[in-house]
């Protein structure tokens, strides 16, 4: 499965009042493995950032003045996210800004370009109700180091969120999902690389006999038949 972890930085909090995207960062995962194939641009929003937003991201109007406009990178962006699952922390915020940028260009809404959108903030609230579920809080909870994060940055935050997402969704199926990495072929395609082989060792006759003796002993002590033995007989 191809997944894209996405984050944006903006001039303010409200795209409806004219706030714009100033940075967009995406990292790619294939079968829960980071590929190193990232998408990252600083963007010229053609306006100043609000003081509060500037304090968060530190991207000045002067720094952004020679960067491309969203219209100049939109086709590349849409190709990058095409038909992938998009993973975003507080998705309604970022998607709202992306939709506003697409609407200015008379292009379809973001969800029409992608397979699905997953909100890790909603996932975290279900897993940790009543607790802080900001990206920083989740990094601390799952042991993801964010010591190098002094200011918000779209690419850095996407990389941190990728680690948090993997930790937050790691379950019994993660062993089989993490067994392959991906190399890059001469044509630029991603080629699975086997990282490990699962070896199944069946129980030996003496081990099965010892297990049966243990179950019989439990039955004797309980003066009943163990539930799993009843299920096995049915």
Image (tube, helix red, strand yellow):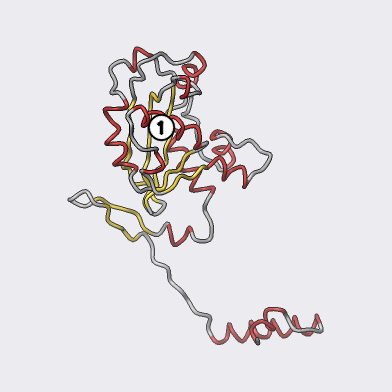
Residue drawn 37% across and 40% down? 27
Residue indicated by mark 1: 98
Decide which of 43, 155 is in the foreground and name it: 43
Decide which of 145, 99 is in the foreground and name it: 99
**227 relative position to 103: left or right:** right
Q: Where is residue 6 in the image (x, y as percent from the top left)?
A: 42, 38
Q: Where is residue 197 in the image (x, y as percent from the top left)?
A: 39, 66
**10 relative position to 74: left or right:** right
**209 relative position to 81: left or right:** right
Residue drawn 42% across and 41% down? 5
The quarter of the image holding the C terminus is bottom right
SS category of the residue bearing label 1: helix
| Structural crowding at the residue carrying mark 1, measured as other residues with C-alpha within 10 Å and reported as few (<14), some (14–19) or many (≥20) | many
Q: Which residue lies furthest to the left in this view?
A: 186
Q: Position of residue 78 (x, y in %)?
A: 31, 39
Check the image and report above or below for 28 versus 97: below
Residue drawn 42% across and 44% down? 86
């Amino acid at each position: 499965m191809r997944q894209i972890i996405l984050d944006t930085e903006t001039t303010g909090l409200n795209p409806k009042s004219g706030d714009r995207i100033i940075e967009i960062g995406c990292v790619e995962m294939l079968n829960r493995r980071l590929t190193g194939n990232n998408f990252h641009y600083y963007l010229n929003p053609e306006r100043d950032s609000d003081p509060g937003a500037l304090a968060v991201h530190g991207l000045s109007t002067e720094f952004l003045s020679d960067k491309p406009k969203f219209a100049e990178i939109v086709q590349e962006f849409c190709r990058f996210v095409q038909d992938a699952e998009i993973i975003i922390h507080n998705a309604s915020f970022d998607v709202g800004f992306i939709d506003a940028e697409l609407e200015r260009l008379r292009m379809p809404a973001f969800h029409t370009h992608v397979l699905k959108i997953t909100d890790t903030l909603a996932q975290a609230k279900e897993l940790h109700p009543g607790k802080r579920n900001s990206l920083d809080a989740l990094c601390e909870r799952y042991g993801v180091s964010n010591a190098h994060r002094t200011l918000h940055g779209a690419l850095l935050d996407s990389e941190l969120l990728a680690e948090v997402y993997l930790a937050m969704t790691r379950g019994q199926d993660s062993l089989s999902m993490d067994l392959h990495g991906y190399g890059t072929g001469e044509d630029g395609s991603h080629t699975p690389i086997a990282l490990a082989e699962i070896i199944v060792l069946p129980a030996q006759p003496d081990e099965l006999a010892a297990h049966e003796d243990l179950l019989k002993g439990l039955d004797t002590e309980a003066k009943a038949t163990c539930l799993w033995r009843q299920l096995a007989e049915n």
